[in-house]
Image (tube, helix red, strand yellow):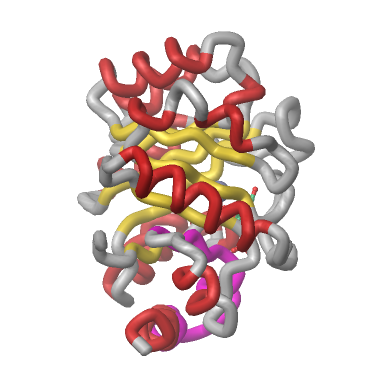
Amino acid sequence: MQPFLIAPSILSANFAKLGEEVDKVLAAGADLVHFDVMDNHYVPNLTFGPMICSALRKHGVTADIDVHLMVQPVDTLIGMFADAGASMISFHPEASLHIDRSVQLIHQAGCKAGLVLNPATPLHYLDYMLDKLDYVLLMSVNPGFGGQSFIPSVLDKLREVKSRIKASGREIRVEIDGGVKVDNIRAIAEAGADMFVAGSAIFNQPDYAKVIDAMRQELAR
Ligand code: DX5
Ligand code: ZN
């Protein structure tokens, strides 16, 4: 069993002082930074690109940066994000014409690679890819916005993904993204997740450490 990781999504941070926000949330006990890239094409919202990622590195952020690409096309941004300091890059398979190639590009760029499945995206996307992945990211909301409610049917899907991973015999992490809160993180972990993205649950509270500690307490129970 790999240790649980908490990955605050900076989508809910105050962008006017992003460097400070990231420092604060890491000092509060976050394990890594989740970086939501939206293009107003694959998803109906627009956020930030590689320049902001490299600005965070220049600011002194040394923690892993977990880049979640909600973009189409995918491949052109992979090298740019790797150069900008990304540690992990995930993409939505239906947004890539050549899924295996995109994963290869991520690995060649020196990053960990993940596939992201939306709540209604079938698991068959994992069929020929699972062995090549470092992690699977399951969306527990429809992508595009922070602050949405966790979709409970994803728990069954999570169990299914976890059992496929077990059968593969490989250590592949399962990340969950969307609507993760202190009061559901335990059930999500029991269903098989080991990396937890949380945006609004952390950044909408005044004391980030208090939320992260409460999440860890739930996970340790
Ligand atoms: C949604 C993003 C999420 C989002 C999570 O498309 O991928 O990372 O920021 O936000 P919360 O935790 O508020 O649901
Ligand atoms: Zn995300």
The answer to which of 208 and 97 lies nearer the viewer is 97
Q: Where is residue 206 in the image (x, y as percent from the top left)?
A: 51, 84
Residue drawn where x is 25% and y is 60% of the image: 2
Q: Is residue 182 magenta?
A: no
Q: Where on the image, by quarter, is ligand 1?
A: bottom right
The residue stretch that appears in magenta: 195-211
The reply, left or right, for residue 84 in relation to residue 48 is: left
Residue 83 as seen in the image, left or right of residue 164: left
Q: Can residue 54 be seen in this view?
A: no
What is the count of numbered marks?
0
Image: 217 above or below 112:
below
Asked whether the viewer can see residue 45, the reply is: yes
Q: Where is residue 88 in the image (x, y as percent from the top left)?
A: 34, 38
**Residue 69, image quadrant:** top right
Quarter occupied by the N terminus: bottom left
User: Going by the picture, which residue comes out furthest to the front?
Assistant: 167
Q: Position of residue 86 (x, y in %)?
A: 33, 36
Residue shown at the point (61%, 16%) measured from the top left: 73
Give residue 139's position: percent from left, percent from top: 61, 50
The answer to whether 15 is drawn above or below residue 75 in the figure is below
Q: Which residue is at 58% across, 84% downward?
A: 183
Q: Is residue 198 magenta?
A: yes
Q: Quadrant of the C terminus?
A: bottom left
Please indicate whether residue 153 sits to the left or right of residue 16 in the image: right
User: Quarter-wise, where is residue 179 in the image?
Assistant: bottom right
Name the residue: 67% across, 42% down: 118
